[in-house]
Image (cartoon, rainbow, N blue to C red):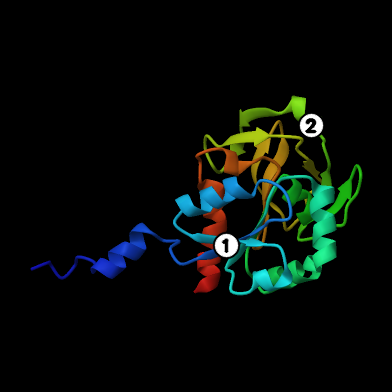
Amino acid sequence: MAGGNQPTTAVAGRASRPFAGLRVGIVSIQGAVEPHAAAIERAGARWKPVRHVRDLEDLDALILPGGESTTISKGLEREGLYEAIEAFAASGRPILGTCAGAILMARDVEGFPVRSLGLIDVTAVRNAYGTQVDSFATVAQGELEGLRAIFIRAPRLKRPGPDVEVLARVDGWPVFVRQGNALATTFHPELTSDGRVHAALLELARKCER
């Protein structure tokens, strides 16, 4: 017979799969949807595409992926998703924006401005690192030791407000930031096997679910 201090099968299962049952939406107007989906599945959570306001129902978290920020912005405008995502954030549920998604999360945008959600008190500068041929990978400095960051036509974040926590930097510039339940990276965490950025989103969702 098992000892009294050993966890039951159900409890042990939850401990080994802490994000099981969480539902993450990925805005699927354009951009790197499938790599994010794979990262969410590896973490043990479920995902679904978000193209319309109704798709936000019953979600625990949301991802705004990288891609072309003007195209994504036009899709959000067309489908009325700006207001719906603002309401989603106001409910306390976490959102992660990566690359173009980080631009859309910012307070304001420089360099071919697009409408942004204003969820993180930073200014995003579009294409600050150059064009596609200027893409590069490096290791970021910060709380997540050894975090490999891939930059593709990446924005730069500047003038973070007092409520913005900088979690990682490259050459002194913020590349991973948090404000409340809003997270943003200027790089593409979905393109590596390091699941810690997605785990940070899911951990916020798990705390919110409680």
- Residue position for label 2: 129
Mark whose residue sits in front, 1 or 2: 1
Q: Nearer the viewer, residue 172 or 99?
A: 99
* Residue 44 left/right relative to 105: left
> Residue 47 lies in what quarter of the image?
bottom right
* Residue 160 left/right relative to 41: right
Figure quadrant of the N terminus: bottom left
Q: Is residue 194 above or below residue 134?
A: below
Q: Amino acid at mark 1?
A: Val
Residue at 48% across, 59% down: 45
Q: Amino acid at mark 2?
A: Tyr
* Residue 92 left/right relative to 110: left
Q: Which mark is residue 24?
A: 1
* Residue 48 left/right relative to 74: left
Q: Looking at the picture, how far across and down is residue 31, in whole percent?
A: 71, 47
Q: Are marks 1 and 2 in contact (CB under 8 Å)?
A: no
Q: Nearer the viewer, residue 56 or 97?
A: 56
State the residue lying farthest toward the top.
133
Residue at 63% across, 63% down: 94
**Residue 161 visible (yes or no):** no
Identify the secondary structure beneath mark 2. Answer: loop
Residue at 64% across, 34% down: 150
Q: Is residue 147 above or below residue 49?
A: above
Residue at 56% across, 52% down: 37
Q: Looking at the picture, how far across and down is residue 149, in whole percent?
A: 62, 35
